[in-house]
Image (spheres, helix red, strand yellow):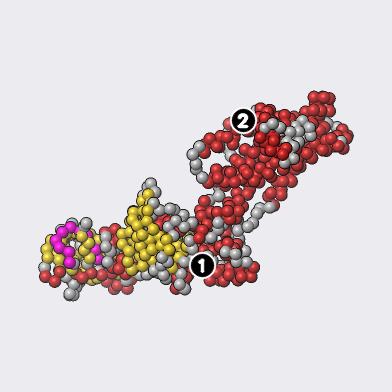
Amino acid sequence: MLKVEGLSKNLGAFALKDVSFTVNEGDYFMLLGPSGAGKSVILETIAGLVRPESGFIYLNNEDITQKPITNRGVGLVFQDYAAFPHMSVYSNIAYPLRRKGVKGRALHRRVIELAEKLSINHLLDRNPQTLSGGELQRMVLARTLALEPKVLLLDEPLSSLDVQLRAGLRSALRAINREGTTIIHVTHDYEEAISLANRVAVVNKGIIEQCDTAEEIFQNPKSMFVAKFTGVRNFYHAQIIDTTEHELRIIQLQSGHKICGYTDESIGDGFVCFPESAVSVSRTSPNQSALNVFQGKVVDIFPQRFGYEVTVDVGFKVMALVTWESINRLELQHGSDVWVSFKANSLRFIPRV
Amino acid sequence: MISKVFKHTNFSWFRLIAALLGGLVLLFIISPLLGMVISTPVKTLVDTAAEQEVIDSIWLTIWVSMAATIVFSVLAIPLAYLLARYDFPLKRLVLGIIDLPVVVPHSAAGIAILGFIARDSFMGKTSSAVGLELIGAPAGIALAMAFVSIPFLINAAREGFALVPERLEKAALNLGASPATVFFTISLPLAWRSIVSGLVMMFARGMSEFGAVVIIAYHPMIAPVLIFERFGAFGLKYARPAAVLFIGVSLIVFVIIRLLSRKNKPNA
């Protein structure tokens, strides 16, 4: 178990402020945030490359805050790989093993084993300069795993790879985690977080905005930053103007439109958001239970991984996810007249602090 | 030749003039050396090469300079690493001190070293206590050579270390290597080319030193001193074959070292 407590560090341009989180054994923990948020510095502090000004780091209940880099037992995979250019792939992987005094046949067996695990056994004699980005990433992963780290720290491991390589490496990372290695992974890509993490900490400007299970973060963002960053696109500055029974609220958007939503917040200023997937699009007035129904025109159709993101202008812009079959069935195109509807219970209201 | 130089580019007067001026410089370097070689008959060269005094002095020059380079590299390379990696108060002053031997007149340097190692000085007393003669001895010559040539090694090695990405050293630390192991397995091998070039420069500079050495030790005679002595005692004609011979030997040695260092690209 890794516990970070009240970590602070001033680095001129930005600062880590009172960063605390706990990573349980076997976790796939994701530090999610925009670039420059301080995610990498958090990793480097855990690895001991950066000394914090205050705060503590505990690894299995041992205070490692002041421990030298060398004997922390924490493996860090650098974003730029940090492959040793004067050594073969084999020697790179063997490096931490040699430091541990592993020799001869045992060394050879272990290197082969790691190389096979990451499917790079055909590259062992090559020089790192001749490898592609994906191959390099696998090599440094094998090298770091050779250390048998108590925690594996990954700094944007997928960011410089193309989509196909990314999928392969993703499953490799997941397999490593399933075998029991605790992973802390830094990323700016929330899709990466959704697909890999079981717990996520959203980092912004040196502060942990929210730390929770992936589901909690994406379904219940606790701040505007998290909501926006995690990709909730229907996100509006709004005001609760009226309350009714059963916690149903009338929420007025800045555009003047009123929508209904459930929240236990009272009258006041804030933000409202609802997921794109909660919005239905139809050509005729929907005869449904949805409380929020608006008529408007399609202003944008943008292809997505699983269909299209359709933007409808109903006086304010609503984004919906529509499968490609529905696009054809509804004959949607720019300027089509449509109805959009979304349920009051799909709304989330975040009061402004 | 000119047509080749300008083949793929537009003609420019500036480039032509720069090339002509550059050619003059090259001529200035080559022609005295070439002239000396041409005006030395092969027979006298062979005769001189057979003289025991000449052989001894060239041999002495080579091995003393090499010894000085190797012994002082043990001190200079770690210093170069510190200078490349860390900032500390008065660092600029330290860098200035390292360059000092380059600007000090070498005869003055010789006088300074002589005072430093004189028999009544601390160094002189200590070394004679352990039976090591400095003045008029190879050890003293080595000190004089090292004094004037060590900046070349320190500066080249420092530049080499500065080019090694610090990330690689940090990665090695993270992989369980101690700082000393990181130095020997990462920093040193990656800076090796610059260090070798610094070693060659230091060795070459040590071999060619005259001013500082002649004050510490006229005898035993290193080649530059021998050439000077023959010139003073017998004149140009007599000094020339020794000079040509020494230049030839120096060239051969450097070519060999360069070739060796190119092949021995270290692999950890």
Mark 2: amino acid: Val
Q: Is residue A333 visible?
A: no
Direction from residue A140 to residue B141 in the image, left or right: right
Give percent across and percent down for residue B176.
Answer: 53, 60
Q: Is residue A271 a member of the stretch shown in magenta? A: yes
Residue at 55%, 37% in the rendered image: B94
State the residue in front, A194 or B112.
Answer: B112
Give percent across and percent down for residue B195.
Answer: 63, 46
Mark 2: few/some/many CA within 10 Å (<14, 14-19, 20+): few
Do callouts 2 and 1 point to residues on the same chain?
no
Give percent across and percent down for residue A140.
Answer: 52, 62
State the residue in front, A299 or A263.
Answer: A263
Give percent across and percent down for residue A107.
Answer: 61, 68
Disc 1, SS: loop
Disc 2, SS: helix
Direction from residue A221 to residue B78 in the image, left or right: right
Residue at 23%, 69% in the rendered image: A346
The span shown in magenta is A264-275
Label tally: 2
Which residue was labeled with disc 2? B103
Which residue was labeled with disc 1? A148
